[in-house]
Amino acid sequence: MKIEKLKEKLKKYENIPLSEININDVDEITDIKINKRKSSNDRILDFLNTVKNPYVFKHNGRLVRIGFADTNITADECLTNVLKNLYR
């Protein structure tokens, strides 16, 4: 998926309230397979291309929303840390 399409996808899903999300339309995080041998940027791109909604996933049947604080930490750094912790 091209970068512009990914940006559109991120913008589309960024502010959807959990109350408007059908749990059956959300990816189970443990079912998402990312190649650990790829660079962190490629893993992030794989994740964004794979998931339906990059901000919301299921874990053990519960909805989880990813959010970012207003800090100097970039989204790339946050997502890299999340992926590193999930796919050790």
Image (tube, rainbow, N blue to C red):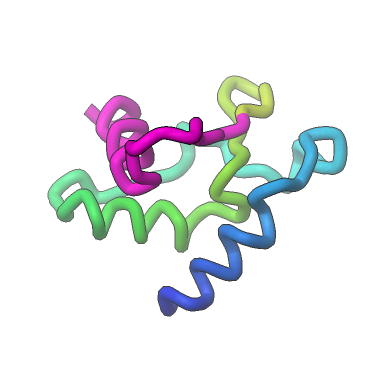
* Residue 71 x, y percent position in the rendering: 41, 33
Tell me where residue 56 sits by quadrant: top right
Return the residue found at the far right. Answer: 20
Q: Which residue: 48% across, 77% down?
A: 4
3 versus 45 height, above or below? below
Left or right: 75 in relation to 27: left
Q: Is residue 6 above or below residue 44?
A: below
Q: Is residue 1 magenta?
A: no
- Residue 77: % across, % down: 29, 41
Closer-to-camera residue (82/86)? 82
Work out which quarter of the rendered image holds the C terminus and state it: top left
Is residue 20 placed above or below 58 in the rendered structure?
A: below
Q: Quadrant of residue 55?
A: top right
Vertical comparison of 23 with 45: above or below:
above
Q: Is residue 85 left or right of residue 11?
A: left
Residue at 17 percent of width and 54 percent of height:
38
